């Protein structure tokens, strides 16, 4: 007697999800279990996991010719999350489950004893199920937090296949995962700008960077607080919108870095990869490409300490993401694009020993060594760093002072006001902040007074600025003007903006 069943599930390539149908056919003939539909090794191995799970959970494994097709057959299926739908399709085809399951979807990896293990990529697959008008989806209990984020679909977290079958047969129902908005606690920041003594110029530059979404390069001797400043940058960035939270959480879900206690990532990411990271580690990759550090910093900050020490290929891999806000990975199987709307913050010493220009400690580097060190950063990459900040030594009086430094909350208030102006300015466009302005938008919104224009012209000729640097100075000046609530870019605004683009001439000329 021939028996057949269909079960709905989903697949994922990069951040893109798609609907998948698992078809099981049981027919007479010598016992055999085949999986077709372009499966990878992990999917093929599900045969053994499914067989053991069925037997160990006291269901009957059909003694017949079993053919499982994972459609569409022209897309390669990767991952272990097809285990559960394959098992359900066999139980349905063998009539051990008689309930109508057309309105259900299933995802999950199985252990040999029938336990349903957590998987990566649950959130985007639950969103795909909702968009496909599926009424309910079964997910691993470990992924309950992220699965409950999606509204408009019943999400059933299950610990093992017995719970799934009991629910389908009506023996014992699973309570759907429920998300209360107030449960998404936004904890206070552990670090604050008030911890940093002195460095008023650097703080001002980072405030401008946060207000306009500009990339930064900090240059200064070791121990001056470059890393401290960078780590506190997320505390003055605007709160994440709901869309940004979901975007970021999806990336972490696909990368398998979400954890089972997180519903939504509500704090802006701060990623600080070691300088030994490879180009693939930054951009993402692998046989089934996963997001790299650049994409994991999406909507947040990517901090690159000891910037010259990064591998040249790794450093140069930043150029396209900083310009286009996306990372494109091309493999033989196709092209995958990950978002990378980041603020890049790099830190470096002025020379290999770190004490060039130090007021008290002599530099031990030769001129040739200094040149080799600085030449590790290419001109095009340097040009993409909007703001260049010189971080000087802090005097003893500042370090020992009892006076309170300005808190991150106070700085964030000013940043939020500047961002509100930009949100109104760019309403209805894809531009999110001043740093992301197109050349056309830069020309339209960066209107200079006559005095400001005269100073910019003189500086452009004297400093030998590139067209990209010219545009970036205008965008930085626009941000400074927004912080001052000024409609036009005036002389003080353009003068300060030019100051943030002159360090490369000091150190690299």
Image (cartoon, rainbow, N blue to C red):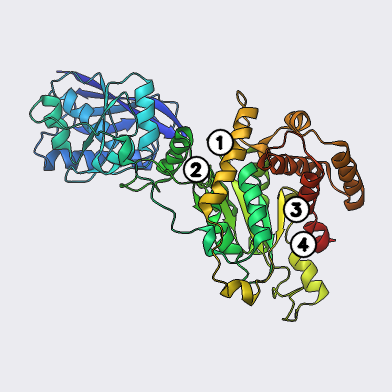
Disc 1/disc 3 C-alpha distance (Å): 32 Å
The residue that mark 2 highlights is 289
Q: Does residue 195 sit above or below 339 in this rendering?
A: below
Task: Using a 10 Å C-alpha cutoff, classify the residue at mark 4 as few (fewer than 14 neighbours), some (14 to 19) or many (20 or more).
Answer: few
Which element type, helix, strand or loop, lies under badge 3?
Answer: loop
Tag 3 and tag 4, C-beta contact below 8 Å:
no
Q: Does residue 452 sit above or below 307 in this rendering?
A: above
Disc 1/disc 2 C-alpha distance (Å): 10 Å
Upstream in the sequence, badge 1 or badge 4? 1
Task: Using a 10 Å C-alpha cutoff, classify the residue at mark 1 as few (fewer than 14 neighbours), some (14 to 19) or many (20 or more).
Answer: some
Name the residue rendered at 61%, 63% in the picture.
226
The residue that mark 1 highlights is 337
Q: Does residue 497 sit above or below 179 in this rendering?
A: below
Name the residue rendered at 38%, 21% in the picture.
131
The C terminus lies in quadrant: bottom right
Q: Is residue 315 visible?
A: no
Q: Is residue 499 visible?
A: yes
Q: Nearer the viewer, residue 195 or 142?
A: 195
Which element type, helix, strand or loop, lies under badge 1?
Answer: strand
Q: In this image, 316 relative to 259: left or right?
A: right
Upstream in the sequence, badge 1 or badge 2? 2
The residue that mark 4 highlights is 375
The residue that mark 3 highlights is 500
Q: In this image, 450 relative to 413: left or right?
A: right
Disc 3/disc 4 C-alpha distance (Å): 20 Å
Name the residue rendered at 72%, 40% in the picture.
481
């Amino acid at each position: 007697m021939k028996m057949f069943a269909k079960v709905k599930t989903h697949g994922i390539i990069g951040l893109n999800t798609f609907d998948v149908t698992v078809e099981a056919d049981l027919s007479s003939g010598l016992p055999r279990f085949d999986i077709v539909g372009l499966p990878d090794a992990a999917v093929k191995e599900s045969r053994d996991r499914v067989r053991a799970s069925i037997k160990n959970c006291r269901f009957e494994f059909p003694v017949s010719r079993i053919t499982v097709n994972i459609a569409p057959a022209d897309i390669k299926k990767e991952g272990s999350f097809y285990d559960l739908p394959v098992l359900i399709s066999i139980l349905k085809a063998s009539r051990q489950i008689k309930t109508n399951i057309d309105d259900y979807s299933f995802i999950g990896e199985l252990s040999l004893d029938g336990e349903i293990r957590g998987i990566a990529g649950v959130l985007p697959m639950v969103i795909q199920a909702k968009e496909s008008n599926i009424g309910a989806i079964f997910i691993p209990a470990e992924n309950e937090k992220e699965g409950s984020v999606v509204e408009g679909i019943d999400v059933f977290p299950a610990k093992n296949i017995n719970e799934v079958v009991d629910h389908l047969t009506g023996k014992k129902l699973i309570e759907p995962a429920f998300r209360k908005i107030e449960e998404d606690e936004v904890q206070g920041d552990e670090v604050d700008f008030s911890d940093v003594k002195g460095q008023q110029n650097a703080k001002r530059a980072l405030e401008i960077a946060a207000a306009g979404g500009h990339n930064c390069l900090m240059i200064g001797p070791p121990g001056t607080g470059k890393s401290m400043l960078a780590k506190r940058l997320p505390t003055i960035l605007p709160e994440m919108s709901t869309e940004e939270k979901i975007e970021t959480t999806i990336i972490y879900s696909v990368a398998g870095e979400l954890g089972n206690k997180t519903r939504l990532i509500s704090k802006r990411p701060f990623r600080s990869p070691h300088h030994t990271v490879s180009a693939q580690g930054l951009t993402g990759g692998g046989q089934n490409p996963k997001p790299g550090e650049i994409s994991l910093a999406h909507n947040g900050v990517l901090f690159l300490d000891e910037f010259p020490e990064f591998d040249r290929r790794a450093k140069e891999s930043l150029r396209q993401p900083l310009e286009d806000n996306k990372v494109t990975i091309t493999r033989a199987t196709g092209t995958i694009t990950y978002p990378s709307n980041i603020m890049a913050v790099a830190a470096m010493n002025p020379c290999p020993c770190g004490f060039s220009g130090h007021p008290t400690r002599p530099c031990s580097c030769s001129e040739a060594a200094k040149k080799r060190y600085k030449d590790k950063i290419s001109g095009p990459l340097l040009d993409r760093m909007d703001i260049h900040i010189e971080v000087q030594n802090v005097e003893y009086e500042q370090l020992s002072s009892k006076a309170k430094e300005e808190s991150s909350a106070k700085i964030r208030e000013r940043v939020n006001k500047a961002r509100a102006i930009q949100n109104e300015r760019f309403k209805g466009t894809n531009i999110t902040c001043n740093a992301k302005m197109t050349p056309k938008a830069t020309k339209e919104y960066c209107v200079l007074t006559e005095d400001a224009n005269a100073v910019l012209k003189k500086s452009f000729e004297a400093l030998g600025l590139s067209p990209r640097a010219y545009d970036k100075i205008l965008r930085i000046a626009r941000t400074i003007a927004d912080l001052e609530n000024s409609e036009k870019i005036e002389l003080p605004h353009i003068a300060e903006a030019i100051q943030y683009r002159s360090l490369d001439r000091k150190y690299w000329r």
